[in-house]
């Protein structure tokens, strides 16, 4: 294969430059367009090596086998940065429509289908050949290393000992200290500025502790809050119902959902007027 360098630069170095190239069959003027992100020299040698090993794409390999290495000429179409190689390659492919490329999309072979003849020939070449790993046994060290590699990332603090013991580990407060701590917090009131700041911070945030309505899927019963639903079903404070809604699991043998229809909830929980001296009830 001869090399024909097409460039205007006098300081061109094929072992350092990257870009788009063309391999021309000088007998029938058919060509292959490609790009390299390593160097033109490396890519040129790679084409020769693969073609000698019969590993090039079917079209190029067929032409190589028929006309021989001396019929091909390596030319440079564009010198560009690595990040621009694919885009320039696509532009040149669209302009030249190379015959020896198996796909017309730069950077991949999407949409290309091998011929039945190629599939049969490829299958026959592999038939009867054992797998490279067949019959080989991995050592215990290799198995252990592979096992650890597939166990996922290790927590960064797992098994790490700092050597420092918390100062209060195992210590219990005396009754005097407990009394003093209690006295220091009694009678303390938040300032108005603090209350305003907290109010602004929490405004617009939904709090599940404020008693949002919940609905039982099985019974269609609606409760004013999780706590009320839990108590009605012989439960506790409603934590299990919150977990049920979040995870889609059951709580107290039932399934629960948030009752988000505010208008309907308002009608359900609106107190009825007094009837015959009886206190207001909820529907």
Image: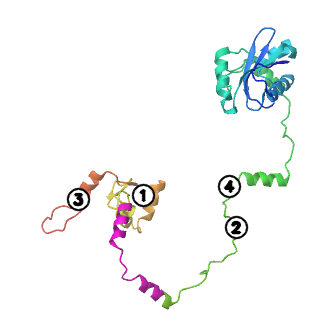
Residue 255 drawn at (x, y percent): 42, 55
Residue 245 drawn at (x, y percent): 44, 56
Q: Residues within 10 Å of mark 1 (few under 14, many from 20)?
A: some
Element class at badge 1: loop
* Measured Cα–Cα span from mark 3 to mark 4: 54 Å
- Residue 20 in the figure: left or right of residue 27: left
* Measured Cα–Cα span from mark 3 to mark 1: 26 Å
Q: Which badge, 3 or 2, comes first in the chain's sequence? A: 2
* Measured Cα–Cα span from mark 1 to mark 4: 37 Å
Element class at badge 4: loop
Please name the residue that numbered disc 3 is placed on: 270
Please name the residue that numbered disc 2 is placed on: 160
Residue 233 sits above or below residue 22 on the image: below
Element class at badge 2: loop
Q: Which badge, 3 or 4, comes first in the chain's sequence? A: 4
Q: Which badge, 4 or 2, comes first in the chain's sequence? A: 4
* Measured Cα–Cα span from mark 4 to mark 2: 15 Å
The residue segment tinted magenta is: 178-201
Q: Residue at x 86, y 47 (%)?
A: 137
Residue 199 magenta: yes
Please name the residue that numbered disc 1 is placed on: 254
Which mark identifies residue 153? Answer: 4
Classify residue 254 by image quadrant: bottom left
Observer-nearest of 271 and 74? 74
Q: Which badge, 1 or 4, comes first in the chain's sequence? A: 4
Q: Residues within 10 Å of mark 4 (few under 14, many from 20)?
A: few
Element class at badge 3: loop
Q: Residue at x 79, y 13 (%)?
A: 25
Determine whether label 1 and label 4 are within 8 Å by CB. Answer: no
* Quadrant of the rendering where the C terminus is positioned: bottom left
Q: Which badge, 2 or 1, comes first in the chain's sequence? A: 2
């Amino acid at each position: 294969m001869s090399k024909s360098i097409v460039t205007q630069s006098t300081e061109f170095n094929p072992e350092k430059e990257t870009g788009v190239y063309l391999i021309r069959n000088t007998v029938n003027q058919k060509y292959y367009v490609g790009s390299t992100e390593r160097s033109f020299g490396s890519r040129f040698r790679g084409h020769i090596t693969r073609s000698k090993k019969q590993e090039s794409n079917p079209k190029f390999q067929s032409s190589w086998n028929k006309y021989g290495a001396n019929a091909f000429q390596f030319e440079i179409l564009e010198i560009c940065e690595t990040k621009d190689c694919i885009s320039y390659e696509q532009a040149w492919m669209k302009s030249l429509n190379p015959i020896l490329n198996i796909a017309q999309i730069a950077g991949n072979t999407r949409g290309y289908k091998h011929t039945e003849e190629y599939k049969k020939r490829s299958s026959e070449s592999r038939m009867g050949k054992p797998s490279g790993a067949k019959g080989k046994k991995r050592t215990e060290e290799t198995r252990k290393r592979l096992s650890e590699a597939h166990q996922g990332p290790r927590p960064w603090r797992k098994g790490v000992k700092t050597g420092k013991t918390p100062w209060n580990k195992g210590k219990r407060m005396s009754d005097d200290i407990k009394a003093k701590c209690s006295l220091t917090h009694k009678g303390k009131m938040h300032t108005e500025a603090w209350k305003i700041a907290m109010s602004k911070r929490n405004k617009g945030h939904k709090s599940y502790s404020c008693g949002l309505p919940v609905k039982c899927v099985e019974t269609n019963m609606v409760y004013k809050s999780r706590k009320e639903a839990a108590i009605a079903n012989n439960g506790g404070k409603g934590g299990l119902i919150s977990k049920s809604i979040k995870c889609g699991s059951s709580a107290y043998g039932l399934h629960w959902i948030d009752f988000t229809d505010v208008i309907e909830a308002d009608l359900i929980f609106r107190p009825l007027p007094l009837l015959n001296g009886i206190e207001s009830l909820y529907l």
